[in-house]
Image (spheres, grey):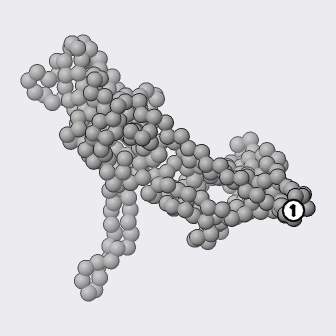
Amino acid sequence: MPLITTVLTGPGDPSVPPVEVPDVGYASITYIDPTGTRWPMTDVAADWYALAEGVSGLGAAPYTLTTDPHPRGGARLRHVQAQPRTIVWPLLVKGTDHTAFTANWRALARAFTRTLREGPGVLEVARPDGTRRATEVYYQEGYDGRGQVATGITWDSAVLTLWCEDPYWLGSEPLTERRESGTGVDFLAPYPSVSSGQVLGATVLSNPGDIEVWPTWTITGPATGITFTNSASGESFQLDPSQTAHGDLLAGDTVTVSTDPPGVSGPGGNDWPGALNWPGAILWALPPGETPVTFQLDGAGPGSSVSVTFFPRYETA
């Protein structure tokens, strides 16, 4: 059976001319508050912008190393754990007069502190080539003026500390790779060939990021059984629709398997936790680089497909 491969991606374009930021290089940076409002941070013509001096936390993730003493001296590394990221963000706010400055100052304070009540904001770094990386942030502290003569009238600055649950930067657009069952062909026309209704087969998935990702899988029927195998590690999981009240997947039926957090959603959004082959199921991660995998769809036919979607993860902005 032929495999039809589709790779989708869309980085978008930066909306602000790039400026040089320490540890990042030339980039334009935007803060997106929980309401979706975009606040440009590197447009020096605006009434607020980040101060390059003092920016930190945009580089590699912080790590904690767990070690065991070695009897002959030194130690042996036992475990590596990435820690939440902290970003230090100096910010200048100004206005044409005191009234305009106060309005801007209050608006920026609300945009950052509302993350503590309404969910995280997003700090997005856009490069001149149009690629973007982002991380979710929560306001921690620091939105206070300098307390010096002449500040607080038409301008002031603050040094914010932003806290990030995820230590890594994400590509701002998800990547989707799709493998689809091809249409069967006549065995003798135009030359001897075979199409199978059982197996989509072996293929390769590519993760362009620096860190492993935990993807979301979408299976479209028809299918009577699904097995996903990481051929490099041997890890696999199986999905058996017959273990649910719905039964086999018909043409157009879709099932979504989330690997982080683990979960299965069947047609109509119904929860299908019992469809996986627990406890043997391993909802494996996709490491950086190319990974050989095998998608086996028993009972596959025209329209059967598998899609994998993930946000690449990166060490730095």
Please give the name of the residue rendered at 11% of the width and 21% of the height, measured from the top-left corner. 150
Q: How many marks?
A: 1
Residue 115 lies, in percent from the top left, at 39, 34
- The residue at which mark 1 appears reads as 191
Residue 9 lies, in percent from the top left, at 56, 44
The answer to whether residue 245 shows anywhere in this view is no
Looking at the image, residue 205 lies above or below residue 105 = below
Looking at the image, residue 38 lies above or below residue 130 = above
The residue furthest left is: 149
**Which is nearer the eye, 73 or 127?**
127
Image side of residue 1 versus residue 48, left or right = right
**Which is nearer the eye, 108 or 301?**
301
Element marked by disc 1: loop
Residue 39 lies, in percent from the top left, at 37, 28
The answer to whether residue 137 shows anywhere in this view is yes
- Rendered image quadrant of residue 142: top left
Image side of residue 104 versus residue 307, left or right = left
- The kind of residue tagged 1 is Tyr
Quick one: label 1, few (<14), some, or many (20+) residues within 10 Å? few
Please give the name of the residue rendered at 77% of the width and 62% of the height, measured from the top-left corner. 199
Residue 172 lies, in percent from the top left, at 48, 42
Please give the name of the residue rendered at 43% of the width and 26% of the height, measured from the top-left corner. 37
Image side of residue 191 versus residue 122, left or right = right
